[in-house]
Image (cartoon, grey):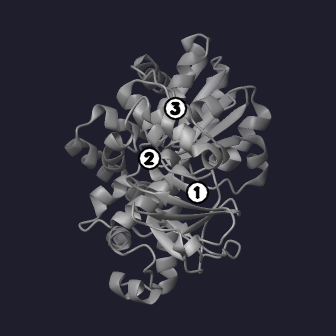
Amino acid sequence: MFDKIKRYSSLFLASKVPEYKRSIYHKINFNEKMIGLKGAKGVGKTTIIHQYLNSVDIPVNEKLYVSLDNPIVEEYSLLDIIDTAYEKGVKLIAFDEIHYKKNFERELKAVYDFFDIQVIFSGSSAIALSNSDLSRRAVVYNVPILSFREFLELKLNERFDGFTLEEILNNHEQIAFDIISRIRPLKYLEEYVTFGAYPFFIESNQDTYILKILEVINKTIESDLLYLFNIDIRNIHNLKKLLVVLCENPPGNFNITALSREIGINIRTLYNYIEALHKGKLIYLLYYNKKGNSLLQKPDKVLLDNPNLFNVLCQDKNIGAIRESFFISQLNEHKIRYSKSGDYIVDGKYIFEIGGKNKTKKQIRNIENSYLVIDNEEIGSEKKIPLWLFGFLY
């Protein structure tokens, strides 16, 4: 068994790895004994693992890569693999697709406690480290889609600074001026919104990119969600139908009873499916006041998780929903709630209204810390900020 794993690992380590390192790579503390990467399919978790393995200055026989969706490891536990690897002198092991092992939390805890070996693992965005003992041991990072800034860096082979939300709110005119002195961001924004949220855009044309996103959607539903949420395989079509219906409905037009009837499932099952699609990073749920972890609370707004998904799932694309999906996806490190005044409350204190160039501040005129986010404008003024600039948050 180990010889076969080692062979696949050697092939992986010897393969070409992209030079470009995403911003999340530089935020990871690689000195930790156990590191986890969570994120949607296609966002580059395996690439980060590959880059790290290749950067560690130890002999190749002391590091090991194991993809847990490989059939050759199906009958072996993580402890079986680690035990043998440790005996062979391995000091660093990477487990890709960790969610394919049912007892991975318990086994990773045992690995941390009893083996002097560094572990880095990746898994679906839908996994939850429910074992508190493991969550105290493993440092887990969320890997998002490419930001607009990262897309520009990859496409143009240039470097651009990232900014905090507060820096953008307080100094957006100067920041936008400095950027548009180098490039015209609106020239590239439509391409990003349509074809640029996943790193594989760099090796794809528009047709193959769409096919790859479709593969991301299908694998997320057919592999990750069915496995993690114990969904009957016969109901795959209901999950896919739900995703398309949510895509084509305006984001604020959300009637649970009508949706349940249209999909042909009961309301409790519908809520379970909605939560699964949310955890799988295919949709984004927004609440004005979320009540704990209740699964049976109706979201106030539902958006696709990132704007590229509209191009695959929606026959009639809603430009307002695409704008809002872009905005939400770029603020992935912030807490976002639905707002009854304006569109969103961010970090509990900033109110944002999203719209086209003719949008006014009428809805938020007298609200403190409120901002108008405008599409198709290169530079703003005072509390009017161009939408594209939020793509420079990471």
Query: Residue under circle 3?
Result: 22
Q: Position of residue 39 (x, y in %)?
A: 52, 47
Sooner in the amino-acid sequence: mark 3 or mark 2: 3
Q: CB atoms at circles 3 and 2 under 8 Å apart?
A: no
Residue 245: image quadrant is bottom left
The image shows residue 233, relative to residue 35, as above or below, that is below
Task: Please state if 365 lies on the left or on the right of 317 as rendered.
Answer: right
Give the number of the mark in front: 3 or 2.
3
Q: Nearer the viewer, residue 102 or 199?
A: 199
The secondary structure type at the circle numbered 1 is loop
- Residue 383's label in the rendered image is 1
Q: From this viewpoint, which residue is outermost toward the left? A: 207
At 66% from the left edge and 43% from the top edge, which residue is drawn? Answer: 140
- Residue 91's label in the rendered image is none
Q: Nearer the viewer, residue 216 or 96?
A: 216
Residue 70: image quadrant is top left
The secondary structure type at the circle numbered 2 is loop
- Residue 41's label in the rendered image is 2
Task: Give the residue type at disc 2.
Answer: Lys
Sooner in the amino-acid sequence: mark 3 or mark 1: 3
